[in-house]
Amino acid sequence: MPQRPLRTAITLVTAATASLALSTGPAPTASPARAADRPADPKAMRDLVKAYLASVKYRDEKVALADGYVPHQCSSDPAGHGSMGYHYFNESRYGSLDPAKPAALLFEDGKDGKRRLAGVEWIVLDSDQNLKTSKDRPSMFGGQKFDGPMPGHYPGMPIHYDLHVWLWKQNPNGLFDRWNPRVKCPAAPAHPGKSDTAHTGSSGTAHTGSSSTAHTGSSSTTHTGTAGKARAVR
């Protein structure tokens, strides 16, 4: 294992242990993933390290694209709490609760013009497709509850739950918080094109996208996100 990922994995375990153990109160109704009501356990730590090591290869955007992750718009919170970055969705992994198989990757624009990996995300479709019920809300990493249920983020995406984990970009609001104030979206659309559906969370707050799904990198290849029918995989 390369030394940098190994050192970062060790640091992650230490930081995540502190993050998970700090909160002892109940999670807020609107954002259940923001707090943990129990101390971290060894399995949760192992799962976080597993997720980190499995996502190392996706630091190269081209590897993410080759593995079926489709780029979509950059999502920001209109209330100013931060951004999620560009979602790269892999519909074949919807329903996965495997730490090594996230359903989405979160990228941000780097100073060099390339996109950098900031976080990973798991997506589980809502069984009854009803925004008013949440009996099937999943959890991972020692009881971290998913946000939702919420509408899809692009045409054809079903009602679902999701859980963000900021493994590659430190989030001052917490490892599992939806919004990262250190992640920025472009102030205006960088490319012409059709934008995705507004991203609405369980709190009813719309997540606005500031750019189209098209991404032109240094190789001049254009990556365009397509809206297909989501498939649930258990």
Image (spheres, rainbow, N blue to C red):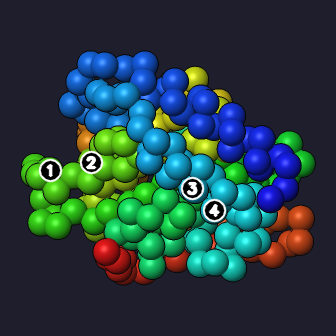
Q: CA distance from mark 4 to mark 3?
A: 5 Å
Q: Earlier in the sequence, mark 3 or mark 1?
A: 3
Q: Earlier in the sequence, mark 1 or mark 4?
A: 4
Could you tell me which quadrant the C terminus lies in?
A: bottom left
Q: Are marks 4 and 3 in contact (CB under 8 Å)?
A: yes
Q: CA distance from mark 2 to mark 3?
A: 22 Å
- Side of 136 relative to 142 (left or right): left
Q: Are marks 2 and 1 in contact (CB under 8 Å)?
A: yes
Q: Earlier in the sequence, mark 4 or mark 2?
A: 4
Give 185 or 178, whichever is nearer the viewer: 178
Q: Are marks 1 and 4 in contact (CB under 8 Å)?
A: no
Rendering coords of residue 38 (x, y %): 31, 29
Q: Which residue is mark 3?
A: 51
Q: Please tell me in which quadrant of the rendered image residue 201 appears.
A: top left
Inspect the image, locate mark 3, and give the three-letter code of the amino acid beneath it.
Ala
Q: Which residue is mark 4?
A: 54
Crowding near the residue tagged with mark 2, few <14, some 14–19, many ≥20 C-alpha atoms within 10 Å: many
Crowding near the residue tagged with mark 4, few <14, some 14–19, many ≥20 C-alpha atoms within 10 Å: some
Secondary structure of the residue carrying tag 1 is loop
Q: Earlier in the sequence, mark 2 or mark 3?
A: 3
Rendering coords of residue 71 (x, y %): 60, 66
Crowding near the residue tagged with mark 1, few <14, some 14–19, many ≥20 C-alpha atoms within 10 Å: some
Rendering coords of residue 153 (x, y %): 40, 59
Labels 1, 4: front one = 4
Mark sitting on residue 148: 2
Mark sitting on residue 134: 1
Give 60 or 158, whichever is nearer the viewer: 60
Give 199 or 18, whichever is nearer the viewer: 18
Identified at 26% across, 19% down, the residue is: 25
Q: Are marks 4 and 2 in contact (CB under 8 Å)?
A: no
Could you tell me which quadrant the N terminus lies in?
A: bottom right
